[in-house]
Image (cartoon, grey):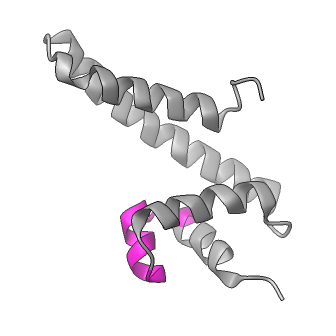
Amino acid sequence: MTNPVPRSAIDLRLDGLSFEEIATALGVDCATAIELIQLALVFLPGLREVEKDAIMLLELQRLDALQFALFARLKTGDLDVINPTLEVMDRRARLLGLYSH
């Protein structure tokens, strides 16, 4: 029997919910919600390519928005956002599989 939680997490993410909202809906913490989405993208056999592509696009758009806002702050000399900017860049690279395994 398969676990319905990862499938539910994907459905909620496709509906545009944030990780915090997904965590609340599923009764888990935010880190677990993120992990469920990541695991489902890789291991859920019933997840169609179109759903994977939709989630990938949604995640990349959110990362773009975050990076845009962080770069704006960097341009004003706010050096406190260097590490968050690098974290966003790292997350994008991992999402796109840009690192060697």
Q: Is residue 23 left or right of residue 74?
A: right
Is residue 72 depicted above or below 55 in this figure? Answer: above
Quarter of the picture containing the N terminus is bottom right
Q: Residue 98 sits in which quadrant?
A: top right
Q: In the image, is residue 88 part of the stretch drawn in magenta?
A: no
Return the residue nearer the eye: 58 or 98: 98
Q: Residue at (83%, 70%) from the top-left corner? A: 46
Find residue 8 and report its horizontal and vertical position in percent: 61, 77
Q: Main secondary structure of the magenta part?
A: helix
Q: Is residue 65 left or right of residue 5?
A: left
Q: Which range of residues does the magenta coloring cover?
A: 13-27
Find residue 29 and report its horizontal and vertical position in percent: 41, 71
Q: Is residue 2 left or right of residue 76?
A: right
Find residue 92 and report its horizontal and vertical position in percent: 55, 32
Is residue 2 depicted above or below 36 in this figure? Answer: below
Q: Residue 30 sits in which quadrant?
A: bottom left
Find residue 31 and report its horizontal and vertical position in percent: 45, 61
How many numbered marks have been drawn onto this rendered protein structure? Answer: 0
Q: Residue at (79%, 66%) from the top-left corner? A: 44
Is residue 52 depicted above or below 48 in this figure? Answer: above
Q: Is residue 18 left or right of residue 9?
A: left
Q: Residue at (52%, 59%) from the top-left corner? A: 34
Return the residue nearer the eye: 14 or 75: 75
Is residue 56 depicted above or below 87 in this figure? Answer: below
In the image as oriented, which residue stretches furthest toward the front? 101
Q: Residue at (65%, 52%) from the top-left corner? A: 54
